[in-house]
Image (tube, rainbow, N blue to C red):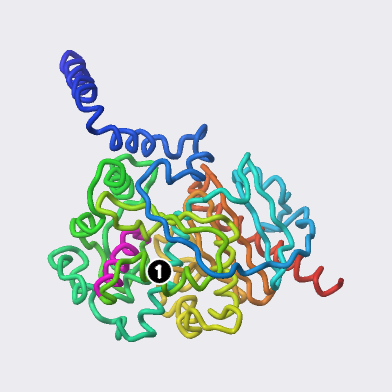
Amino acid sequence: MKRVIQFLLLFFALVTGCGAYFKTELTQLYHTVRLFDEDVIVSNFSNMQKIAPTKTVKRSGDVSKFGQQHRLLPPYFSYNGKYVETDRWLKETNTTAMIVLKANDISYEEYYLGTGEFDYRISWSVAKSFLSAIFGIAVDEGVIADLDTPVTDFVPELIGSGYEGVSIKNVLQMSSGIYFNEDYGDFFSDINRMGRILALGGSFDEFATTLTRYHEQGTYMHYVSIDTHVLGMVLRAATGREFVDYFNEKLWSKLKTERDAIYITDSVGEPMVLGGLNLISRDYLRLGKLYRDDGSLDGKQIIPAHWIEESITPDAPHLIPGPRNNAKTHFGYGYQWWIPENADEEFMAIGIYGQYIYINRKADVVIVKNSADLRFMENNYESMDYAVAAFRGIAYSVAENATTN
């Protein structure tokens, strides 16, 4: 106990003496440690630019307009043979925003828990699908000619790490074989180590070089967030451009958004492409609509249609939706997009704590849901299955109403 007290006194002295010099880092560490605490999580998720260093990508040009055709959500949806109240599901999952788009008309839009339509909302892993979009543009332009090329051909600093010799395609499909502990509840997990880099300083590039491999690549789907950062490294090397510049030129400036995009960065200014994007909810909706519409907006092809199809088409047994050995969910996976079990022209971008872009081409519907759902990871991510059931119920209710009116 004496040693513990001495350590605490020393730590307090260091913090007191260095507090002024390290004020930013200490503030960021404090907010990072409390990021998911129940009393502040809703506010934190709408104010990430106050918690971490950021870069802003300015909106430009015209704004794409949505029509309005308001309808009530269905009161119930079916999950595992039982009816679930939609309002109860929205409340229990700590929903902060929900928008439903049918064709080009918003049929439902609501904000919850004191948040508003112009709140910036953290994407978490929904950002991965934005990265996939511009990665596909680079492939289509020929700067990345072959997805079977090892990532180390573009990023030699990864030679000697677990990524040595791993193909771009396997990284895109979360099949790199890299060991990565993504348990947000484990202080010493890799995802939380990465969070402390964000708070205290350091480089995501350097962090990627420290990881090792524990599966043969291309044989096992294991969700590794840093895989997406490695894709960002490849994209930078292939294009010779800063990520935010390429993102702006190829996607953001053409998406006709309402507001700027804000990316969290590491201490050297590199965007957190794996989960650090902050947008208003309607701008998430715009990417969903673009993907629903085969990459075309107002007659202009922004994302190659063939890339979208490849992105949402699992092409190996370990990626197909359904039960798989040791898989936490039954969802399938493509190029940074999720495919639910028994999908009927459906695919999704999903972020931790309940961020969703759900796309249902058959119903011509896109749904965006932002949340601060502390129960998101319970029962092997059963919340994702609930969300699919809810989205399907909403989508087909909206589609049916549209055809009968």
> Which residue of the protein is positioned furthest toward the right in this rendering?
405
The residue wearing badge 1 is 247
- The residues colored magenta run 223-237
What percent of the width, then of the height, locates residue 116? 62, 46
> Which residue of the protein is positioned furthest toward the top in this rendering?
2
Up the image or down, 150 lies above or below 43; here it is below
Give the quarter of the figure containing the N terminus: top left
Q: Please state if 7 lies on the left or on the right of 200 as rendered.
A: left
What percent of the width, then of the height, locates residue 293? 60, 78
Q: Is residue 202 magenta?
A: no
Up the image or down, 184 lies above or below 232; here it is above
Q: Please state if 364 lies on the left or on the right of 166 as rendered.
A: right
Residue placed most toward the observer, 274 or 362? 274
Residue placed most toward the observer, 112 or 375? 112
Up the image or down, 375 lies above or below 207; here it is above
Q: Is residue 229 magenta?
A: yes
Q: Please state if 121 lies on the left or on the right of 368 as rendered.
A: left
Q: Secondary structure at mark 1?
A: helix
Residue placed most toward the observer, 384 or 404? 404
Please say whether residue 255 is visible from this viewpoint: yes
What percent of the width, then of the height, locates residue 92? 63, 43
The amino acid beneath tag 1 is: Phe
Q: Please state if 357 lies on the left or on the right of 158 as rendered.
A: right
Residue placed most toward the observer, 331 or 131? 131
Determine the residue positioned at 33% across, 49% down: 191
